[in-house]
Image (tube, rainbow, N blue to C red):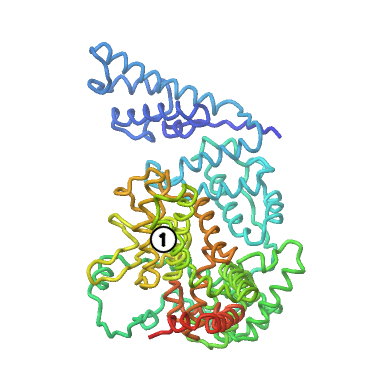
Amino acid sequence: MTMSSQNTITLTTLKDVRHVLPAIYSEASTKTLEAALRKTERLTGRKLSQLPADENAWFEIARGVTWAGAFRGVTPGDQQDAFETWVKKVAAMIRRAQQHVAQPVDVADERQAWDQVVGYAEAVENTFDECGDRILPNLFARSMETLRARCAWIHPAGLTTETAKTALVACRSDKVGSLRNSFSAFNTLIRDRHKHTAIAHLLPAAPIGSLPLLRDAALDWHLFSEVFLASRDRAITKAVRPDREQRRDRFQGRLGKSKLGAAGARKGHRKVRNTASATKAHLNALSWLIRHAFPDREEAYGVEEVEELFRPEIVKRAVANYIARAKASDRLLDPSDTSSAGTILSRLQTLAERNDWSKDVVFEIEDARYEHVDSYHSREMSKEREQFVKLVERDPSAVRAIVSGPRRLAAEAQLVFDDWDNHKMRVREEALHLSMGAALLALQLARAVRSKNLNLLLVDGPDVELVRPLREARPWLDISRGRVKNRRPIEGEIPDRQWKVIVGWLDQGLPRWCEKHDIDLDKNVLLLPGPKGVLSRQSFNRIWNRCVTRIGVPGLKPHLMRHVAATIWLAANPGDYATVAAFLCDSIKTVEKFYARGEGAAAARLFAEALEALDPTLSAFMRRR
């Protein structure tokens, strides 16, 4: 539909004019005119918000401007012409902007209107007015983008309480919170329309009213006793700001006090927590627990201590009611399709752990997180475990093929390297692929590295990650936390068994690879260089697939090797979750969850049996010394 605004809007300052420019000029012209406005501030010594958006007033101000030397020109006459052109340009800008807002503005369609609102928010957010106040907060445009995505079917001026309710009903349950926040942000534009003249004609006449809760009634904290509220606040404070004992030294103080750490704390290097946001999240989690565990709120209002709510049977009841309610509703998402409940349960677990409440309730929350509601982490790892168990069950010899694969591939490539000049180009290319694949498999068995880090691994330069040994040193892998997905550095020694394979690629395969692809070996810093920099992902996957097929394990993906490496170790050293956690750069708790039971434990048993039956030497090699 076509919307038309009959509102009378006036521009009062040149700052208002600047905000209107994108609506009446092209992008290139807008940049030129904004430069002219910046020169206005320099020559007048006044801010745009202090200069009137009036053509006659501007000419009066321009007469008092000292412009000598401020404009380019060979002669003084040329400089004066440039000055007069600039004055007329600013005047024309004011005149056209005033005409634009004085006349009814026709917007072609809803999309164009929303694009103008979002564009304005992007230009104005995190800027300040003449009083030093922020006009729109940072990331305000994100809220407007959310509205555009959820309410694209209606013009911005048509957003009312009723249409907002309609959009809220159609919204996914896990996105309702962000949409509510976007409506609240939009209301600030409506209430302060005099500050946003550039888009005032696109705004509704009245703010959006209060929107009802579509799920269930909000919890009224005022109906709880003062004793309960006090215990609730103490528990949340302890969860948000854990004491020094809970941030204990993993070395139990045996290394003494860190002077460097103390200095960093004094200088403010310690990360500042957003305590207000964390407190709000814990309150939301508690509300979720009470609302789902106690359909009759009166029973909950009689609880005297918050710890009484953290019992296994209450958590189990809340999760069961949540799942049943979601499945019965045509609007709520299935718990297996959204991670909302997983996030809430994580908060509840933090509350229980930081307050040293019953371990039984912690275990119950953990089980609920990983068995009853959706978790991206659990879904990803469960899928990998399932794939790996099927692989080992289908073909037990895959164990030996994986562990001995790097040596086999490197040996085949070495046969060609030893007689390089007498082989055809096709055989040489295959040998290079086998040598590269052998190095990649060896690295995965030496250290659980994600495929992205493998593809971008540095072997030279100031930030080298694969460090060659010098004198009595050991080969080392050192990937900084900034280049790792979970922000945990990957570092440690590479065993000789794997290093012999890797160095074969570095010393023999890589130089020939660079020569074949016209890459300057002396300037190359990558383990896997390509003709245009790093080896493309398509080439990486193609070479990897060729190599794992060659050793008899087709379908073995690079990321699955993380599970392979962990399972190999646990097969030879059952229960050694601490070593696996360090190997994977993960927490011991996570490793125990995914490898102590279910498919993880089954894979470890199968792997142990296959190791011992097929190659006893491999089993002995993997034993801890």
Q: Determine whether the residue tagged by mark 1 lies in a helix, strand or loop.
A: helix
Give the percent coordinates (x, y) of residue 487: 42, 65
Place residue 301 in its image quadrant: bottom right
Inspect the image, locate mark 1, and give the three-letter code of the amino acid beneath it: Gln
Which one is nearer the viewer's eye here, 501 or 213? 501
Place residue 557 in its image quadrant: bottom right
State the quadrant of the N terminus. top right
Which one is nearer the viewer's eye here, 493 or 263? 493
Give the percent coordinates (x, y) of residue 378: 58, 71
Q: Is residue 323 above or below residue 417?
A: below
Q: Is residue 299 visible?
A: yes
Farthest residue to the front: give it. Answer: 422
Could you classify mark 1 by the number of other residues whose Cα lies within 10 Å: few (under 14), some (14-19), or many (20 or more)?
Answer: many
State the quadrant of the C terminus. bottom left
Q: Is residue 590 visible?
A: no
Give the percent coordinates (x, y) of residue 359: 53, 88
Determine whether, in the image, residue 578 is placed left or right of residue 192: left
What is the count of numbered marks? 1
Q: Is residue 108 above or below residue 285?
A: above
Which one is nearer the viewer's eye here, 254 or 156? 254
Q: Is residue 246 above or below residue 525?
A: below
Q: Is residue 164 above or below residue 83?
A: below
Give the percent coordinates (x, y) of residue 398: 57, 72
Write the residue at 40% across / 66% down. Answer: 501
Residue behind mark 1: 414
Which one is nearer the viewer's eye here, 541 or 6? 541
